[in-house]
Image (cartoon, helix red, strand yellow):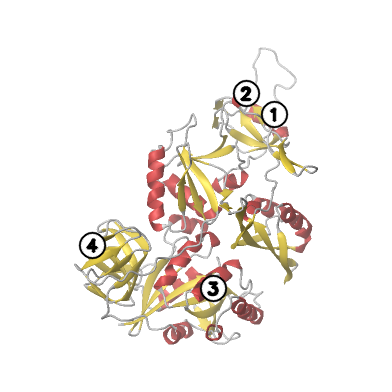
Amino acid sequence: MKLRNVAIIAHVDHGKTTLVDGLLHQAGTFGDHEERVDRVMDSGDLERERGITILSKNTAVQVGDVKINIVDTPGHADFGGEVERVMKMVDAALLLVDASEGPLPQTRFVLRKALDAGLEVMVCINKVDRPDARIEEVVDEVYDLFIDLDASDEQIEFPIVYACAKDGWCTDEPNELGTDFAPLFRMLLDKVPEGAKDSTGPVQMLVTQLDYDTYVGRLAIGRIQSGTISRRQDLLLCGEDADKKIKVKELFTYQGLRRVETDEAFAGDLVAIAGVSDLNIGDTLTEIENPQPLPRIRIDEPTIGMTFRACNSPFSGREGKKVTARQIKERLDKELLHNVALKLEQVEGEDAYKVYGRGELQLAILIEQMRREGFELSIGKPEVRMIPQEDGSKHEPFERAQLDFPEEFMGVVSEKMSLRKGRMNEMKIAGGGRVRVEYRIPARGLIGFRGEFLNDTRGQGILNTLFDGWDAFAGYIPQRVNGSLIADRTGVTTAYALYHLQPRGKLFMGIQVEVYEGMIVGENARENDINVDATKSKQLTNFRSSGADEKLVLAPPIPMNLDKALEYIADDELIEVTPSSVRLRKKILAKNMRSVVRGEKKDDKKGKKKKK
């Protein structure tokens, strides 16, 4: 069989999944009777709701007598672990770049991983139909990026096609209109190295993905590096700690979007094997008599952590079915099996677990998945992972943040980034009255910044980040200034109470909402917290007063979804997540057990932090 294995890599929203849709359609994957769905590779509910790719997925198209295995990868930096592990499955990568935006931070990340893996890289300039397209400049920027990443002379001589994936065409020349993806198919056949290797050698297959099938159970997915695998064959599973014998109960290859049963698969093909109950990503399947395990997958270290614990509020157990710490731990252990970018640690002295990932979005997706599965849990404030050094100091993660916004907001943005220890590396005019600025900033400084940035730029700002290594601790960074409005008793909110609380700050909820003591109902306009009665009702008497018929006009509350809540909470606060609610609360609920004075202030004279 003639094989080609290629990954589609790009920055988020540059058109990877749309391009795969077009390739599947034009390769005749769908029959005339089948319904054609947009973004067919984004099969998960959260992927469709958020409009992003979260998990890497593979498909296959048949072009003549050649089978092309295509892997669609995520474009968001938080899911970089998905990109890293699939590099072992392919021989080439197709880099998509927006014809207007050009290379962005995640473009640099995925390209660096492809070059480090020694893959053949091809470039597709997508969205050439945009009115603000600057094709020649973007091509020059791509060349500069290859040079900046120390690409070899052979890698810099990459082929280019120019595409409009939405309309289903591409061309070899930048200013021409095409009719189909024939030039792209031709480039894949000519430039992607032959996938089939030594089918007669010893069996070697690296497990790069796990899946589950209702009928056959757990599936180990990967690429056969050498040898031939047959159904009912006995193999050796080389794990991280121990080896064991396994039997291949079922063997599948990919055809379009479907897994197809087969009796035999050869070197170079992507396959799924059923019958292995206990395995992890990075394990190797090899021969029993002549075991030759492959190097395990190396993944960059996670940088952001959150504490997961069982919910202990007065409303615990009302909405969810899985509420214990043991059930939460089992679910997190299950997630670690296929999400290699996560790490889990037990919190010393507590029945809680700290989960580390690449970013807030990755962990927010995990929390959202758990709540939809019926879990109730409490989440702590995101915090960065520190690495202790031999001299007693600590290193923290830094990010490369690229901000694109109208130039009229340059003053407020630069002020906010300076307060968060950001250092400007580059600034250039992006056209249309916009500027593009690049900062190097501690990851701590970006926690809670995205919402502020959107407010400061009136929703017109675009923020992209990329991990940029570890460096010395940058010092104190001010976080949220305003305090919270905290319910001081259990009850139901009333219009009378909320009306008189409005001058105090911003409210997060409307009337007829159940609250409990210690639950956060809004943001204080001042610095400290305030315990308030959000359930108070007007005292009724048999005397008519001048204000008896006063109309209570309430401002619309600010709804706090999970993403906003993660940006808002302070160190002494938690997010209570249930299948139908997201509530903010204090760690200590009783008002007589906690202080309303909050935050830290830096003493400029002594250079130390002190409580206000």
Of circles 3 and 2, the one toward us is 3
Q: Secondary structure at mark 4?
A: strand
Q: Which residue is mark 4?
A: 246
Judge the density around disc 1: few (<14), some (14-19), many (≥20) Cα neighbours within 10 Å.
Answer: few
Q: As shown in the figure, which amino acid type bears the numbered disc 3?
A: Leu
Of circles 4 and 3, the one toward us is 4
Res 374 seen here: no
Q: Position of residue 479 (x, y in %)?
A: 68, 45
Horizontally, residue 253 falls left or right of residue 445, namely left
Residue at x 65%, y 61% (from the top left corner): 462
Residue at x 22%, y 71% (from the top left corner): 289
Q: As shown in the figure, which amino acid type bears the numbered disc 2?
A: Lys
Dot placed on the residue nearer the N-terminal end, 1 or 4:
4
Q: Which residue is mark 3?
A: 111
Q: Nearer the viewer, residue 92 or 601?
A: 601
Q: Which residue is mark 2?
A: 536
Q: Which mark is residue 500?
A: 1
Q: Secondary structure at mark 1?
A: helix
Q: How many marks?
A: 4
Residue 507 falls in which quadrant of the image? top right
Whether pointer 2 and pointer 1 mark residues with C-beta atoms closer than 8 Å, the reply is yes
Marks 4 and 2, Cα distance to the nearest angstrom? 66 Å
Marks 3 and 2, Cα distance to the nearest angstrom? 59 Å
Q: Secondary structure at mark 3?
A: helix
The quadrant of the picture occupied by the N terminus is bottom left
